Amino acid sequence: MGRWTQYDEDDHRLPEGMKRVGYDADTQQYTFKDQDGSLWVGREGQEFGEMTKVSEGHTDSADLEASGPSRADGYGPLATEEGQLPPDSLSRSSYRTLLPFFLIICAFLLLVIRLSSPSLAKPWPACPEHSRPYEVKSGDTCWAITTPSGGSVDNLRRLNPGLDCAALMPGQRICVPTKA
């Protein structure tokens, strides 16, 4: 420990008779109590410094320190309503914070299942008479697909409306005319 650390403690920093009794993390304010029981609040974000009086002294049993269980360092849990302690269970807001994360994970898992499952792949097109289904391979052209079966490119386009021979993709499924 350093040479001057004893001067960082409450006994040296606070006026005589003042005691630190709480801290509100939401407002970042410390609460202090003086000899007559009055409560004082420090400025936001400051451990020591200017204080504002927030309540008069109490001599009855409704004292903050005597009202509930206290820790060895003098701090105690804040009451939510008169006589009630805050719940120990997690609040719903913590689950709301995690919800987008879990939704992203679920969407990712569904995408992986969709892409890896062969049973969910596109079904073969229903091909009319005198034609059969065909899956385009890398390097295929409309002419190369129709010549072995004795068909023509015009017949191929009639069987597959909207087919663009310049943009054939490997894995694309089309109907190919057969010999009649």
Image (cartoon, rainbow, N blue to C red):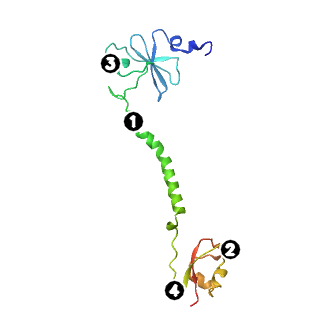
Viewer-side label of 4, 3: 4
Looking at the image, residue 62 lies above or below residue 113: above
Viewer-nearest residue: 49 or 155? 155
Disc 3 designates what residue? 62
Q: Which residue is mark 4?
A: 129
Labels 2 and 1: the sequence-earlier one: 1
Q: Are marks 2 and 3 in contact (CB under 8 Å)?
A: no
The residue lying toward the viewer, choosing from 88 and 18, is 88
Q: Mark 2: which secondary structure?
A: loop
Circle 2 residue: 139
Residue drawn where x is 48% and y is 17% of the image: 51
Q: In the rendered structure, which amino acid carries the disc numbered 2?
A: Gly
The amino acid on which the numbered mark 3 sits, given as a three-letter code, is Ala
Nearest the viewer among 103 and 41 is 103
What's the amino acid at mark 1?
Answer: Ser
Judged from this view, the residue extending furthest toward the right is 139
Q: Earlier in the sequence, mark 1 or mark 3?
A: 3
Q: Which mark is residue 89?
A: 1
